[in-house]
Image (spheres, rainbow, N blue to C red):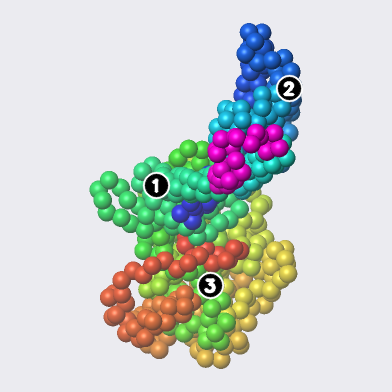
Amino acid sequence: MPPAPEPHTTPTVSLRQRLANDAKKREAYVSAFVAGLSALSIVLLLVVVQVGAIDWDLGKWLAAVLMGLVGYYGTLYVVLKRGFFHRWIYVVNCCIEVSAPSAFLIADTLYRGPEYALSSPPLVVWGALVMTSALRSWPRLALMAGAMAAAEYAAIYWLLILPRLPQDALVTFRPAMVAARVALLFCFGPLTALTARYIMRQAEQALSAIRAQDLMGKYLLHERVGSGGMAEVFRATYSPEGGFEKMVAIKRVLPAFAEDPEFVALFRQEAELCSLLNHPNIVQVLDLVRHGDTLFLAMEYIDGPSLKNVLRAATASGAPLPLQAVTYLGAEIASALDYVHRKASPEGQPLNLVHRDLNPPNILVSRHGEVKLADFGIARAMGRTHVTRVGTVRGKAGYMAPEQASARPFDGRADLFALGLTLHEALTGARVLKGDSDAALMRASVEQEVPPPSELRSDVPGALDALIMKLLARLPHDRTPSAEAFRQALLALPPELAPYPRGRAELARAVRLTLGDRQTEAMMDEPSLLSQIGTAPAAPPGPPGTESQNPTALTIKVRAP
């Protein structure tokens, strides 16, 4: 897709970068052309000398200049074709090209007189040579070329031509008029630089506009909102021929992985499995697009941050998430997990799906309090390509169940353990498992005693404590048996803790504060007003290194039955 804009996208190569990348080849062509033209000029010069149009003394001077050009540019062509290039070659070549008329002007002055020199053809092409410097996509070079041409013309005139002019020379050959010529020649530099900048800017804007809509004619890309080791995510507008528009997220596979057949196969499998998931608490996969040399995944766009960013903002403000917001969060995620764990194939066969990577960065929350589970990872389904190998551990260190961290067999109850860790962190604002490395965090999952949330937050009641700690039982058979059972337990809590109807409004307020949107904060006091708030513009992306505020591609972890 198109570095990166460009309408702020990424990664597409800009026009300046393209010109820079093509500099060596372009300069080699110019060198070959100048060397060939100079060689042809030598042949024509010899013919002109033979017929007597130019005397031999002048012919030798001109031939020496032309032979010097042939030698230099011929050698440069060979050097460039062998791979060497430096930007200062631009400067050297520009100096030689702009100075060539000076050599002819000196020769004409010495051998044909000052008046002939001031009206000779080389003066006509001097301005054109200054303008050709803009072809090297370096506008400052044009400024140098204009100043250099003007300085050489003025120096030759005042030092060589003016002393040789007769007293009755034409007005056009006198200093005042020549000074005007010098000024005009100098002006070619800024004029060329401005023209080059304008054309390049217009060309970049045109290429950006084309680039932005180049995804199968359906997706208009906007800014990049996140990136990882294997892919990057853009906000985009889906705009088919029918005329309606829809905001989506586009995940682009990075070029290095797009060329890996195995990874491409896994990416396609991911899209196929994710297309089977259709639940209000799961980020929806909409389309898989192969365009050019890479793959794109179109997904539901979530107008809000990750839960990690919400918790970070709450911790920074000193105001933890309200209890009802946490129970609402738990009920919504449990609903998604129950759907995933129970999902069957179109033929009715259980898929045995396990998320295996549930943690705050993979939970997205819209500014209206919607909760979405994302980023399922890649594994295998029954009869599909085997990806997860026996004995390996996949998941996020610090959020794994003990059996998962130990590479033992596990099922959907591992996701319930991760949910318990996530809700514990949502209540207390601190990560539960402690360790200074992935290995230490995995050991902590097996060995560390987890304190109840009430030890870190005094207003957490015993009923909620018990539900969270039941999820965090070390042995799978001691945990809450299913996501639906946990959800029902949350619904049975007293009204002051129950997830509905206040939980969504409380969570939406926390999201608004995370995004810095205080203008509508007061509206969150009435849950009924949530449905009246229109979709607001997308929040700006965070600084490099922070989690995306939009979904990454959904991926699936599947365990064999």
- Do callouts 2 and 1 mark residues in contact (Cβ within 8 Å)? no
Is label 2 or label 3 in front?
2
Residue 2 seen anywhere in this rendered image of the structure: no
Above-or-below relation of 434 to 525: above
Residue 7: % across, % down:
46, 54
> In the image, what residue type sits under mark 3?
Asn
Residue 533 seen anywhere in this rendered image of the structure: yes
Q: Secondary structure at mark 1?
A: loop
Spatial distance from mark 3 to mark 1, Cα to Cα? 31 Å
Residue 196: % across, % down:
52, 45
Q: Residue at x 55, y 38 (%)?
A: 172
The residue tagged 1 is 213
Q: Residue at x 71, y 37 (%)?
A: 163
The residue tagged 2 is 61
> Is 370 left or right of 374, judged from the image as shown?
left
Magenta segment, which residues?
161-188
Farthest residue to the front: give it: 168
Quadrant of residue 237 within the rendered picture: bottom left
Residue 104: % across, % down:
67, 28
The one of 108 and 251 positioned closer to us in this rendering: 108
- Do callouts 2 and 3 mark residues in contact (Cβ within 8 Å)? no
Q: Secondary structure at mark 3?
A: helix
Report crowding for label 2: few under 14, some 14 to 19, many 20 or more residues within 10 A (C-alpha).
some
Residue 87: % across, % down:
69, 41
The residue tagged 3 is 309
Spatial distance from mark 2 to mark 3, Cα to Cα? 75 Å
> In the image, what residue type sits under mark 1?
Gln
> In the image, what residue type sits under mark 2?
Trp
